[in-house]
Image (cartoon, rainbow, N blue to C red):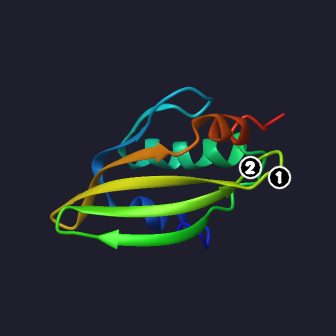
Amino acid sequence: MFRRGDREEAANLFAPDAVFRYPGPGPIHGDWRGRDGILMFWAEQDRCSGGNLRPEMIDLVAGDRNVFLLVRFPRVDGSGTWMRVVVYEVSYGAIMSAHVFEDDPDAAVAFFSRAG
């Protein structure tokens, strides 16, 4: 859903009061609350990446309460990639929260500071 651009449908997987947490420095950090907040987060990712947001999904692992998504992003300087893990907490069929972990926070800040 997210990759094919249907963000509204993807946002409906979240509970109405879900929280999307992006810690650390950079232009998109913070807690984004509710479906509208999550849609705003995704739009900010697009804007802050200068329209270059094309994560490559590497793996998806689902347990009873959590789903782990591993994606890869290109480094701004072309020197390779960095990885992101998003941990989704699921309850009663809805995503209650998401928490982002970057393996190279400096690469993420550079990537999401591309908007002019």
Which amino acid lies under the numbered mark 1 shown in the image of this protein? Gly
Residue at far top of view: 25
**CA gap, disc 2 to disc 1?**
5 Å
Q: Is residue 5 above or below residue 31?
A: below
| Horizontal relation, residue 28 to residue 63: left or right | right
Which amino acid lies under the numbered mark 2 shown in the image of this protein? Arg
Secondary structure of the residue carrying numbered label 1: loop
Residue for badge 2 = 75
Secondary structure of the residue carrying numbered label 2: loop
Q: Quadrant of residue 31?
A: top left
Label 1: how many Cα within 10 Å (few below 14, some 14–19, many 20+): few
| Horizontal relation, residue 87 to residue 91: left or right | right
Identify the disc placed on residue 78.
1
Q: Is residue 92 above or below residue 88?
A: below
Residue 53, horizontal then vertical, whole percent: 69, 55
Label 2: how many Cα within 10 Å (few below 14, some 14–19, many 20+): some
Residue 68, horizontal then vertical, whole percent: 36, 62
